[in-house]
Image (tube, rainbow, N blue to C red):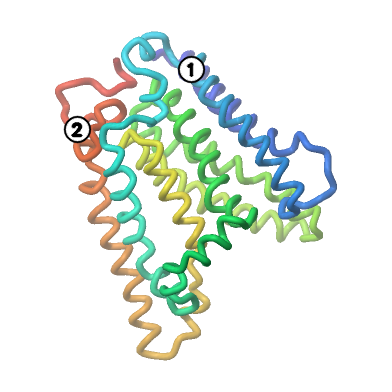
Amino acid sequence: MEATGCWVVVAECLTLSVAYVCSLYVWSSPLNRDHPSTIKRRLVSVSVMGVVSPIFTYYCVSEELLAKHSLWDLLGMRWPGLLAASAVPLLLTMFLFLGPLVVKTQSESLAAWTEPSYWLENLTSIYWLRDHVIAPLSEELTFRASLLPLLVQCVSPVKAVFISPMFFGVAHLHHIVGQVQSGVPFKRAALISGFQFSYTTLFGAYSAFLFLRTGHFVAPFIAHAFCNFMGFPDFGEVLSYSEPKRSLTFGLFVAGFVSWCFLLVPLTDPLIYQNTLYWEPCTSRPPLHAR
């Protein structure tokens, strides 16, 4: 694709990102983001974006590409490799969170996670549903399933992994507005949002990698939901442990990260997921963006 065409694609990706954020603020209300009314209104907004985003992709993606692949395939919603995409990326992400998982079991009983009442309580909580279902579902649908098919038309999948998270990270900067409205000083709110931008951008790269390598929407969605469930690692709690528990726990953090690094490529091999759309398992065919 020519340079002019690539700038058009970037503009389309930016438009999609801005539209997602703006949809959250179409409601005029003094209530903060955690108020039930705000959550319900934003649920309506992201539901609309869940319809708009794929349609936007359909009309913006090249006709040549649509002639070769269905919109469902481009969005990563296909049957071949679905079972593997639902389980293997989650296992991979759990390796990354090996240390935090151990820490979490210190404060939460594993037995509680197997109790139906635990999940029933969570599934009836609008806050839990927002963080673990609605947000991952809507964000992955817009920023991965709908945005990446546009982006890979003019850049390689590898470049798309590093470019697309910028749209995702910037889309989270709007949280600074809610923090300032809740009374947080601007400098502190900016610092918090900057930190959030950093780790959401890193996660965005990982999520894009999962989507492009597996060719499945469910892979980044489940990984996203799991990461939200785990939250950011609580290093402060680990530091409060006495020795040798503290050193052993930090050792698990390192072991988990090293294991994740070694397993990242083999466990996302496109052959496992029957994916030949975004990330070719062989070099005999040109990548999607060059076709």
Q: What is the crowding at mark 2: few (fewer than 14 residues within 10 Å), some, or many (at least 20)?
A: some
Q: Above or below — where is 261 with respect to 69?
A: below
Residue 72 placement: quadrant: top left
**For the view shown, which residue lies furthest in the bottom direction?**
243
Residue at the image position 42 percent from the left and 68 percent from the top = 114
In the image, 101 versus 245, the foreground residue is: 101
Circle 1 residue: 58
In the image, 172 versus 27, the foreground residue is: 27
Q: Above or below — where is 186 with respect to 150?
A: below
Residue 253 percent coordinates (x, y): 36, 70
Residue at the image position 34 percent from the left and 21 percent from the top = 289
Residue at the image position 61 percent from the left and 45 percent from the top = 172
Residue 1 placement: quadrant: top left
The kind of secondary structure element at disc 2 is loop
Label of residue 286 in the image = none
Circle 2 residue: 281
Residue 104 percent coordinates (x, y): 46, 72
Q: What is the crowding at mark 1: few (fewer than 14 residues within 10 Å), some, or many (at least 20)?
A: many
- Is residue 117 toward the left or the right of residue 152 in the image? right
- Is residue 78 toward the left or the right of residue 179 in the image? left
Q: Above or below — where is 184 with respect to 115?
A: above
Residue at the image position 35 percent from the left and 42 percent from the top = 210
In the image, 115 versus 151, the foreground residue is: 115
